[in-house]
Image (cartoon, rainbow, N blue to C red):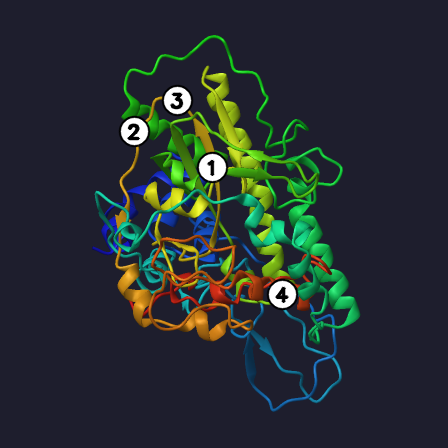
Amino acid sequence: MDKGVAGQSHWPSFREQLRQGRITRRSFLRYAATLGLSAGAVEMLAACAREAVATPRPTPTSTPWPIPTIPEGYVTFGEESDWHGGLPTVAVPTPGPTSTLPPQPTATPVMWEAAAWSCPVCEKRFSTQEAWISHIVEEHGRKIPGARRVSQPTYDQFLVGPVERFDQKNDVFSRTVWDEEYQQQLFSVAPRQRRESASEMLEGRAQVAGSIYVDQTAGSLHPNYGGYFGHQMGVGGLYNWDDAVNPEQYPVLDPAQMSERIKYVARFYGADLVGICEIDPRWVYSHYFDRATGAYGELEIPYKYAIVMGIEMRWAEINESPGFPASAAVALAYSQMAEVAASLAKYIRTLGYPAVPCGNDTAQSIPLAIDAGLGELGRNGLLLSPEFGPRQRLCKVLTDLPLQPDQPIDFGMQRFCEKCHMCAGSCPARAIKRGERTAEPTSISNRMGILRWPVDVGKCFQFWVANGGSLGSLSDCSNCLRACPWSWPIRPWL
């Protein structure tokens, strides 16, 4: 069943609670998001927590500029005004044969009764707020499919061999530090011609720099940390693992109830998606690798649960890929990841239980997110969620706090990706596989034993470098996110 349609039955009463001040604006935003409204529409609705009040607007008593001679009679103005809702229509006498206007009596105040509500998506206008809200919900609500809970994740049917734990040293970003052969490939990449002017590129870099600033300066306190990595051992920062655990432990009598509380708190701190799973050892890295320091060693995680969170990346900016706005949307999500994961870990530690915040480090976020019921694996190698498609960044908190895991979901993504090739067609590096799944890896950056569409991440990152990203001017590529039909704020095809 369409979750957006199902939730609309509660919409009028929820909106009335907002008008009466019985719920907060943030709660309203969260509920509107569950209906699938686009971010712009949600913000517009929340901005109108109270009914508009008619405001007196006096009619001008004199004209401050010369009025050209026009045929005798009257002309109205205001209907084409740039004012939101328009101005009151006022009759203005045209000048006669003399150069001065006849005296005009002071008009009584005109009430702004014909306030018009403009749809932020299609700009259609409505005379009442009720009609305006109904139009947005009915016409522009993002359709979200029904997802059924399943006992096993949908990737399980595609495990065709032993799946060994992955060595973090072999991911494509780590290979830029130690893999000399791959380094030579990157250095030989010719920069692509940018469409931006020098000033536009400067402004774009500034937007990205501001977006990653929180993660870059506070995610880790190591001087070589540039953001995007996640935890580095022994240096502190938001991804710190060494924060003390409160010796006074909060009693957890009902793990299911605690799980609901954890999800509420995670959303309160800024997560858009939250799920819980038991940690499958296969998804924990066999070895850690710190790119900034070169530290490398075996990795064992003693924790039982992973709380996996998704941070939405804004569609308007992702739609500008491969430009700077899309890079800024990605960078901002990384900064938000660090804040949300660190805040939730602190909350759990204060309850008296160990918890470690993780970004891209320690364990593979996508299979954990699938296990936690947030989505499925797509052709583009990313998590696809019913809410945002591939437009989320993932972080997690590992803990022993007693929790109840979520079940995985199936919302038809495997069948969809088998027939849809839009991400593959949009990839400038031709790094996304067309056709059938295969268990053959493209490089050491893919793991063995899984029948899927392995992404050639080496080619992908080479385009990032050519586009001025990571090793250049901080502009990568999100074309596969932009092209995926599940990314679109409006899904008329669903």
Under circle 2, the secondary element is loop
Front-most of residues 188 and 232? 188
Front-most of residues 377 and 375? 377
Front-most of residues 444 and 248? 444
Under circle 4, the secondary element is helix
Classify 206 as above or below 351: below
The percent coordinates of residue 431 (x first, y second) are 50, 68
The percent coordinates of residue 403 (x first, y second) are 33, 26
Q: Quadrant of the C terminus?
A: bottom left
Q: Identify which amino acid the numbered label 2 is placed on.
A: Gln
Residue 401: assigned label: 3
First in sequence, mark 4 or 2: give its number.
2
Q: Which residue is mark 2?
A: 404
Give the distance between the C-alpha atoms of the residues marked 3 and 4, in whole angstroms: 41 Å
First in sequence, mark 3 or 4: give its number.
3
Residue 405 as seen in the image, left or right of residue 303: left
The percent coordinates of residue 266 (x first, y second) are 44, 34
Q: Which residue is mark 1?
A: 396
Q: Residue at x 29, y 61 (%)?
A: 414
How would you rate the neighbour count of disc 2 (Cα within 10 Å): few for under 14, some for 14-19, many for 20 or more? some
Q: Identify which amino acid the numbered label 4 is placed on.
A: Gln
Q: Identify which amino acid the numbered label 3 is placed on.
A: Leu
First in sequence, mark 2 or 1: give its number.
1
Residue 300 as seen in the image, left or right of residue 418: right
Q: Which residue is mark 4?
A: 462
